[in-house]
Each structure stands twice: as C-alpha cells, then as structure tokens.
Amino acid sequence: MSSEKESRVLELFGHSTRIDQSWGEIISGQCCPFTNTRCFKVRKSNPGVSIGTCSVRYGKDGRNVIICPKRLLERRQVFMDAVHLLTQHDPGNELHVVPEMSIPGGSVDYFVASVKRGKVKDFVAIEFQTLDTTGTVWPERQRLLKKLGLKVAKRDANSTKSFGMNWKMTAKTILVQLHHKVETLEHIGKHFLLVIQDGLLEYLRREFNFGHLTGVRVGDTMHIHSYGLDEVDGEFRIDLNARFSTDAAGVAKCLGLQAETKIELETIVAEIEKRITVNTRLTVDSPIPRSDVMPAE
C-alpha cells in the first residue's frame, strides 16, 4: 500500500504490520513475544481484549514511537548494554535480572545483578520510560485489522477518534521520580540507568535544563541510554544511539529541585538476593520474570 495509506500502527503484539503475518492467529493469541505472556495492555471497557500496540508512527516527520515499555525487552539488549555499569562484576559471576523492586522514591523496573554463589556483588537499577498516549489508538488498530481482512466492529472502523503523544506529562513524571531514586543510589555508590527513546530525549533537551549532559562518565550515578526504533526490510529493531550521564546534583539541576533520600546498601542487596533464582539468570533467550510471581514481601 502507498505510504499515505499505511497505518500509523507499526507493530501489533510484537509483529510488524509492514509485512505479511498470520494476523488471525496473532490477534486471537494476544501474546507479547517480549515477555512470552499475554499483552498487559487491555481495554478498560473489555479487559478480556488486549490492545497489543507496541509502536506507532507519529508526527509530521513520521517518527517511529514506542508506546509500550515491554517493547524495550527485545533481545534483552538493554540489559546487555548495562553490564559495563557493573563495575564490581568479575568474569565467572552470573548475571541476574530481578524485576520491580521498591526503593525510596518509588519502584524500579529492573535490577541487573552480578551474583556469585547466591551473593550479590554489584547491581545496576534500570528504569524504562516510553511515551504515554492521549486519546485512543484503538480505532486506528481496528481500521488496520479491517484492511488486513479481519472482522471488526463497524463503529470502531468508522470512528474519527485519534491519538497523540503526552510528551509533557511523560517527561515531568519521570524526572520528578528520578531525582529521588538517583540520590538513593548515589548514597550507596550504585548506578541508575534510564532507558528511553530518542524522541523523548530530544523533548527533554528542549524543555528542561539538560545542557550539562554532554558526555558519559562511568563514575556518574545517573546514566541515560537512548534507543531508536529502526525499520529494516519491514521489520523493526531497537538500536542504542546516544548515551549520557550525570550525578544526583545534575538530575536536580534538570528540574531545579533538591531532595534527600537515604537507604543502606545492605537493604537493597538483601532484597535482590531474596529474589534471585535460576529463572532470573540472564541469557540471550531468557524469559523476563514477572513481578506478580515473585515471592511475597
């Protein structure tokens, strides 16, 4: 189909909409290939139906925008790209990915830990942030399915409702949360990694005081990895395209805020050690453990 008529939905349930797929099976299966579980994005009006939109094309420049954080789990690349921040990791240690732990300032999406004989030797906290949408992507999704020959409700296909990107709220929310978490980790000498997409990084640079973020120092607490979503032969793939770092004072400078959040190193180490299992061990094809099946606190 011509570019003018291409759907703005780029991926459904992890599959590119630009190439032929077994769409009937994909839609009925409702499976997220990045977590190997059912897609968690469900319709409020019908929780039995997963929406499945991973990424969309948006804006006059036709930018590829990831709208689901689970999309960043592709190939476990973001975790591999964080291993160098484990400055106390030794060859032979196991790498584990532990999901969703709470620290002062809020919860952290993942911890990548260097573990030897069940004991944590080092860790890096990792937060994912993708763009929130305004409006609804559902009509665009349903119009696409209709073009693909699947049966959809007429009211959905004829709907004029659209969607936008909630740049301001997404940016402000993540920055306000960040400065609390970064101070916590700086106090105990550990790293915090924010994983975002290139478009969000550009917005942060325009709207906030990011002029002091000009390079990367491994010794900094706060690191930012920016990924693009590239299309090659109709398939989409995340690609690391920028890295920056700063300290807690630098994060506060972004917002003009200051905060004090303290926690002892042993508290986080003990929590990670309690949660590591054979299932959290990081390999190229390892499934990401779900937080809802972790041991109760």
Image (spheres, rainbow, N blue to C red):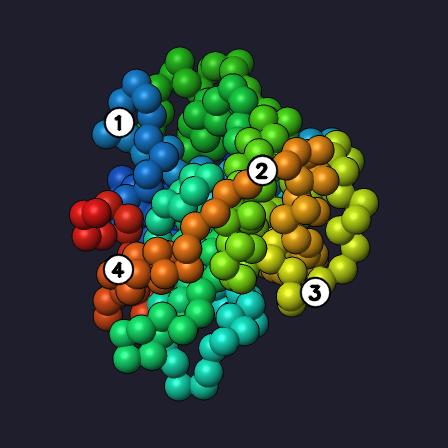
| Front residue (pair 245, 197) | 245
Residue wearing tag 2: 259
Q: Is residue 195 visible?
A: no
CA separation, marks 4 and 1? 30 Å
The image quadrant of residue 34 is bottom left
Residue 254 location (% of width, % of height): 71, 39
- Vertical placement of 278 versus 191: above or below? below
Q: Residue 47's mark?
A: 1
Q: Secondary structure at mark 1?
A: loop
Which one is closest to the eye, mark 4 or mark 1? 4
In the picture, measured across the screen, residue 242 lies left or right of residue 133, that is right
Sequence-first tag of 4 and 2: 2
Within 10 Å of disc 2 (Cα), the crowding (few <14, some 14-19, many 20+) is: few
- Vertical placement of 63 versus 187: above or below? above
Q: Secondary structure at mark 4?
A: helix
The residue depicted at 23 percent of the width and 29 percent of the height is 48
Q: Residue furthest bottom?
A: 92
Within 10 Å of disc 1 (Cα), the crowding (few <14, some 14-19, many 20+) is: few
Q: Split into 4 quadrants, where in the image is the N terminus?
A: top right
CA separation, marks 3 and 4? 30 Å
Q: Residue 275's mark?
A: 4
Q: Residue 240's mark?
A: none
Within 10 Å of disc 4 (Cα), the crowding (few <14, some 14-19, many 20+) is: some
The kind of residue on which mark 4 rests is Arg
Sequence-first tag of 2 and 3: 3
The residue depicted at 48 percent of the width and 47 percent of the height is 262
Residue 94 location (% of width, % of height): 36, 77
